[in-house]
Image (cartoon, coloured by chain):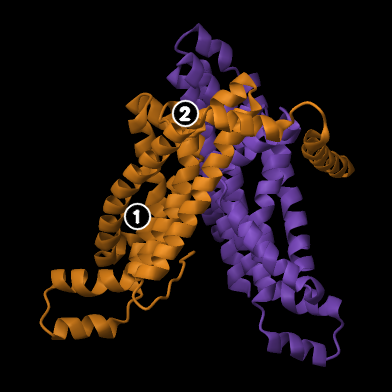
Amino acid sequence: MLQNLWKWLIIPLIMLGIGAAVVIYTVNNPTDSIVARMLTYERVFRVIREHMALLLVSMIGATIVGVLGGIMLSRPKLYYIGRVAENIVNIGQTVPSLAVLALFYTVLGLGFRVAVFALFIYSILPILRNTFAGIDGVERSIVEAARGMGMNPFRVLTKIELPIAFPIIVAGIRTAIVINVGAATLATFIGGGGLGDLIVTGLSVHRDMIIFTGAVIAAITAIFLDYMIGKVEERVVRWT
Amino acid sequence: MDQFISCMGNFFSRAVNGIVLSAQSEDPGIIMRTIDYLSRRSDLILDLMLEHLWLVVFTLVIAIAVSVVVGVIISYYESFAQTVLGICQVLMVIPSMAMLAFMVPIFGIGFTTGVVALVLYSLLPIVRNTYTGIRELDPAIVEAAKGMGMTERRVLLKIKLPLARPVIMAGIRTAAVMMIGIAAIAAYVGAGGLGELIFSGISRGHQPMIIAGAIGVSIIAVAFDYLLYWGEKRFSVEGRTREVTE
């Protein structure tokens, strides 16, 4: 067990180590005064904290709303609305993330909250779709059997439908996280802060070191989250 | 949590109000101003749209050539297929802004940066689908082809690739739709296209410009999706297609 845990942790630890090393190196060895002013521990940590806040708030909200919405749409009474919603969601997912953020900016203005809201709406889509598809894909005969055993609809949902649909729902959450991590770096354009701040600042003052720091941390965050959720997914799939 | 919900609710009502009020009030609302902008600058928008399409199509051709070759190669060398797919997966997970930022110090600002970043992004869907499409062919078909005396090259060109085509097409479609979105971001590093409208609109606070850019990009993406879906159905062997997600 302990050996297994070690195997699990080694890659995330290496990634965190690389991230920390890059931050320490670039902060301590600025190439000139502009870089020194832009890259302080305080500033880098503030940006990372903003990035994490963007991701966490929007993902938690989207997971709750997406899963609940998917369950609601899969109920027999709302099933036809669900079918329509599925098509709308499919089209919505083709819309690029930058376009979504920009459109929210035109309606709601600048700010951290607007960015969170835009990311929240955008990440609901895959979760909602997968929850709906997962529950919809449960074989009718299984549900019939459960009902025949005298389960009420709520118990059918929690004991039969959700456990069977679980891997698909987790896959949806994984897709949402990957999309969300990518879109969170764009939040800087609508005043949402995050690691995009470092990249955009670096591009505009033309200092490769600032760009590099921002890009490395953003990339490591994304790979780290994808790796972790991938491992969780593996476990979940093995269970069922 | 309470605060979160009230904040989100607030945004919803503000968004609805913004759209409804602007349609009712005296001063030209955002919708009218956008229509006005579209009619005045249609030449610019058309130019940028063509630039966007050119970037995507140009990159797509390179990406298909590279990825299909890579996919075919790893279908013969099973041992490093997983490594190559893993690398492609990591490339795709890297945020697009970070990927473009990595490219800027190497390739400078401009079209090349955009093309390289987009090609790297589109590797995964096409490589994975080519690989899976070839691997999952019925071995009996390949055996039969070999039994007929076909050389390996002919088996590949006459049997494997044509039969894997629906799956490869599905990968190309995923890649193309993704590329259109990332090409908009690539405008920030000077690759051109409709993203320019979005970025300059944001920095000038010119809303019709942003809307024109954002909706233009979305329309291109949805249109490409449908076009390639239609193409998939039209040109697939038995009229069946299938998406490979894992």
User: Relative to A75, is A195 on the left or the right?
Assistant: left
Of circles 1 and 2, the one toward us is 2
Determine whether, in the image, residue B245 is placed left or right of residue B203. Answer: left
Q: Which chain is orange?
A: B
Q: Residue at x 38, y 24 (%)?
A: B109
Disc sitting over residue B119 in the figure: none
Q: Residue at coordinates 60% horizontally, 31% vertically from top-left? A: B210
Residue B33 in picture, x, y percent from top left: 67, 29
Question: The residue tagged with tag 2: helix, strand or loop?
Answer: helix
Chain letter of the residue carrying label 1: B
Q: Secondary structure under badge 1?
A: helix
**Proximity of marks 1 and 2: CB atoms separated by less than 8 Å:** no
Give the Cα separation between the discs numbered 1 and 2: 41 Å
Q: What colour denotes chain A?
A: purple
x, y percentage for residue B59?
Answer: 34, 43
Percent across and percent down for residue A4 are 55, 60
Which corner quadrant holds the N terminus of chain B?
Answer: top right
A109 relative to A143, above or below? above
Residue designated by label 2: B44
The quadrant in which residue B164 appears is: bottom left
Q: In this rendering, is residue B246 above or below B64?
A: below
Would residue B10 be visible to someone looking at this image?
yes
Residue B84, which numbered label?
1
Residue B235 position, x and y percent, is 35, 69
Query: Which residue is at a point 74% across and 31% down the rendered structure image?
Result: B29
Q: From the viewer's perspective, is B99 left or right of A164?
A: left
Q: Which residue is more in the foreground, A22 or A203? A: A203
